[in-house]
Image (spheres, grey):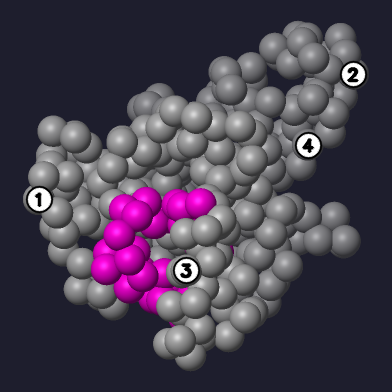
Amino acid sequence: MDRFDDFPEVALDWHRAGKGAVLATVVQTWGSAPRPVGSQLAVSGTGEIQGSVSGGCVEGAVIVEALEAVEDGKSRLLTFGVSDDEAFAVGLACGGTIRVLVEPVGQAVSEEVLADLVDKRAARRPVGYVVNTGTWERKLVGREDYPERFRGDRSGFEEDEQTFVAVHNPPLRMVVVGAVHIAQALVPMARLAGYDPLIIDPRGAFAQEHRFPGEDIREDYPDEVLPDYGLDTRTAVVTLSHDPKIDDPAIEAAIASECFYLGSLGSTRTHAKRVDRLKARGYSDDQIARIHAPVGLDIGSKSPAEIAISVMAQITQALRQG
């Protein structure tokens, strides 16, 4: 399925097709800005667009500047909404202010740098795009150069107010073990929240296409799937089967990985038995403490959909506040 944030890839394709392309990026916001820093809009030289820098408020003005940038090959920093009156004039009726960086591909951003960025994104390698808006020098960096920004998935200017760092973390993924009713509600929610789900269940009656249309379903045990899948810092794992033979291998794989979230369905009593099994297999208290169990925030959920909401909320909390 198409990703929601493939704007560098789109811009590169348009450039290589000879259409001309521009990447517009939100680099700074104040007040009630409609889109966060790092949001992007790709514009082709023929007027095609993909993405958003303001939810529609100032896209028209940015597109005009983008088409001019295709012609003159120059980057520019645009500011919208300095005052309430000016904000209203470009659609920012709430009075928010945004700054947008407009960069033509092949002239300001070299094809080589953009292609390298696209390749690293495709390989699920964390990468940062750094541009100095004073000198217009550009480079790619790794997670080790800006660890706090990557950990918080936070693009923005450095203290010098000239060096902008755009964080490109790998896409979020969610492994759902147990193709049960809760999973049928959770997977669409995860997809809407920007996750690429993987469903694992060795039970053929559950692992059915009609239960999860269009999703990646593996009719196998987790220990047969996860070694090749690779659990990383952008992956959440949720076990829902209620069968230790199915859930435990996934839990052990997650505990040994860098996944940012691990949650397991089951009552307090069920989890106590799970803890005993893991301790018997040599896992430490600190490792076992990584498990969110019973899974989900305690919001009084009853139905499968409500439980899925609580799980999605807890995963979001772990991602944004962990």
Residue for badge 1: 204
Give coordinates of residue 39: x percent, y percent.
Answer: 59, 40
- Marks 2 & 1, CB-CB < 8 Å contact: no
Residue for badge 2: 83
Q: Which residues are magenta?
A: 238-267
* Disc 4, SS: strand
Give coordinates of residue 255: x percent, y percent.
Answer: 48, 75
Gap in angstroms between the C-alphas marked 2 and 1: 60 Å
Give coordinates of residue 224: x percent, y percent.
Answer: 20, 73
- Marks 3 & 4, CB-CB < 8 Å contact: no
* Disc 1, SS: loop
Mark 2 or 1, nearer chain start: 2
Q: Is residue 286 above or below residue 189?
A: below
Residue for badge 4: 29
Residue for badge 3: 273
Foreground mark, 2 or 4?
4
Q: Amino acid at mark 4?
A: Thr
Foreground mark, 3 or 1?
3
Mark 4 or 1, nearer chain start: 4
* Disc 3, SS: helix
Q: How many marks?
A: 4
Residue 248 covered by magenta stretch: yes
Quick one: quadrant of the C terminus?
Answer: bottom right
Quick one: quadrant of the N terminus?
Answer: top left
Give coordinates of residue 99: x percent, y percent.
Answer: 74, 36
Left or right placement of residue 190 versus residue 140 in this view: left
Mark 4 neighbour density, 10 Å: few (under 14) some (14–19) many (20 or more): many
Q: Amino acid at mark 2?
A: Ser
At a point 51% along the width and 52% down the height, the residue shown is 267
